[in-house]
Every structure is written in C-alpha cells, then in structure tokens.
Amino acid sequence: MKNEQLPALDLKVKQPPVLFGKTQALIAKLADRLGGPLVTYWNGPRGSVCSNDVIALHHVLAKLGRHSVLYLFLKSDGGSGQTSLRIVNLLRQHCDRLVALMPLECASAATMVALGADGIQMGPTAYLTAVDTSLNHPLSPVDRDNDRVSVSLNELQRVIRLWREQEGEHPENAYKSLFQYVHPLVIGAVDRAESLSIMLCRELLAYHVTDAEKAEAIATALNGKYPSHSYPILLDEAVKMGLKAERMPLEVNAMLLQLNSFYSEMGQKATTDFDETHAHSNEILNIWESTGAQVYYQQDKDWFYRAEERRWITLNDNSGWRRIERVVKRIVRSELHVA
C-alpha cells in the first residue's frame, strides 16, 4: 500500500466556493415573487437523487415550517426512484399544495419527484424524461474501465426481439446466448425493478390524481413509450401526456437560471491532480436550500489509480453533508451526520 499514499507535493488543494449569501438573497426575492416559500434541490454532474437526500431535506424543512403552498426548484439528472417517493412524502407533510419549478433538466428520478407535485411550471429549456428502469447490479457486466454498467430492461427486450425477428430455420434460445454477457440474476432483477418503477409512478400521482386509469396511463407511458431513457419530454408533450404542466413566467425562469449559475459555481469540478495516479476531490454534488438554511454534500477524498485493476480507488474519504444556517444575525457552519 506504500505506493498508494499521496506524494508529498507543495500543491494547494482546490476548494469550491460556498455562496450562501448570494443564494439566500435570490431565494428571498423568488419567494416574494412567487407568493410562497421556495425549496431548492440541485445536483451537479456527478450528483444524484440518493437516500441521504431525505435527511438533508428534513433539516431544511424543519427550519421552514408548514405552509399552504410550497414551491420546489428541481435540477437533477436522476438517481433513486424510491428516494423520490420519500422526498415527495416529506415535502407534502409541510404543505397543502406543492408546485415544481423546472428551468432546466429534470430527469429520471427527478421526473418522478415532479409527478408528485400538484402543478409543474417549465421554462423554455426545461424537460422531463422517461423513467424506464436501468439497474447497476453487483453481477452487471463491466466496461473498459472495469466499472459495473447499468443494464436496462428495455435494451434487453429489444435485443431479444431483434434476435427473434432475424432467427432462421433453426432458432436458438436467445436467452442462452445472452447469458454469456448478462448474468440471469441481473435480468431478473431489472424486470422486477421495472414493476417497481411503474408502482412508484402510480403512488406519486395518487397524491393529486384521483382518476386511477389516468394515473396508470401516465405511469405506463413514462416507463415504456419512449425509445430512449434520456428522451426530452418538453412542455407540450407533458401536457398531452396528462400532466398538469404550464409555462413558467419569464421573470421567475430568469431568476432560477441565475440561482442555477450560483449552484453551478459551487458545484464546479474541484479536483487537484498531484500526478498521473494521485488526485484529491472536493466537489459539491447535491444541494438543498431554503430560507435560513443550506445543506450540501461535498466529496473530500483522495483518489489513486490502481493500474493492474484499471480503476480508481479512494483513500482518506472524509466526504459528507455540510450545513449552513442563519441563527439570529450569525452564520453557523457545521457537519450534518447521516448514518
């Protein structure tokens, strides 16, 4: 392990900025313009919707209290669908009506969060996506970097369909050949996960959609209609699908884009390269914020490239959730410990 220790170099480790003052001022302006409190949720390029987000959100909502209407700014590439259900459940315990605000991408699991809102407002560059399931399983195939890849049920079904369409007079068992590349337990797990995804969509829509057939149609469309998981569902398509979506006021959209630029500055890539095999990362990945409180997840760990395994491993991992609160006239910083 000696060669996996960081080299002793006199190199300043990069730290991302934390713009609490700027984001708080803009959130106050947005709340005034919207006529109700605003909660923000932002993921960086390497961040995702994860189970610990629920604890972070609970801390933010505890400071905010309960309101008749709550606005939620969403910017995320997705993550855990089951966490989406927990997030919506927690949000709706603090309001009578929930409105999702989307100036940019709101993909996959973030689309699921939007399904639980009574109303959706979309800016000119906003989009939802399909929520069809892909799964990163311990038995999944590996890529060229020796990392496990996600397997999509839709992709597997398309492979099987193409195989059967092109089979000759002596057809072989398509699954027998496929098992050479994808473990059968992975295929079973992905099939089960798709059933879970449809169920999650129905549960989220049930918060405000009383027509069971309509909820089923929306859930089925999001899980199976689109040819790509990242297919952008724009405003007109969302309305046609049956979602309560509308255009966001331009003034609100402009302020949310400004807020996104502050978060993007906070979430900039903060990697310090010591040499070709040693690095350190301090990147901010997830941010929750509302009036008086900001909670964010920050990576803080060393990276070492193990050439014989063709992969990066981590050392000295001090990553975790940090929080900033305004207490009377003081700004208090601390760690938020999540088991």
Image: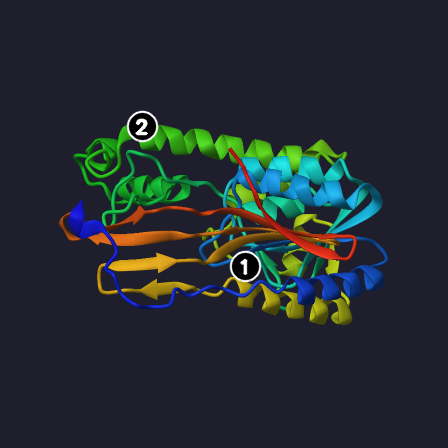
> Could you tell me if residue 216 is visible in this image?
no
Q: Quadrant of residue 254?
A: bottom right
Q: Is residue 235 above or below residue 142?
A: below
In the displayed structure, does residue 299 sit left or right of residue 1?
Answer: right
In the displayed structure, does residue 311 sit left or right of residue 338?
Answer: left
Circle 1 — which element?
loop
Picture coordinates of residue 287, whole percent (x, y): 58, 53
Residue where numbered disc 2 is placed: 185
Picture coordinates of residue 114, whole percent (x, y): 66, 48
Label 1 neighbour load within 10 Å: few <14, some 14-19, many 20+: some
Label 2 neighbour load within 10 Å: few <14, some 14-19, many 20+: some
Circle 2 — which element?
helix
Q: What amino acid is labelled 1 in the image?
A: Pro
Q: Is residue 223 above or below residue 282?
A: above
In the displayed structure, does residue 165 sit left or right of residue 18?
Answer: left
Picture coordinates of residue 333, whole percent (x, y): 62, 52
The N terminus appears in which quarter of the rendering? top left
C-alpha gap between disc 2 and disc 1: 31 Å
Q: Quadrant of residue 122?
A: bottom right
Residue where numbered disc 1 is placed: 232
Q: Which residue sits at x=50%, y=54%? A: 285
Q: Depth check: 202 or 56 in front?
A: 56
Q: Which residue sits at x=66%, y=70%? A: 258
Q: Which mark is residue 45?
A: none
Q: Which residue sits at x=55%, y=54%? A: 76
Picture coordinates of residue 40, whole percent (x, y): 67, 54
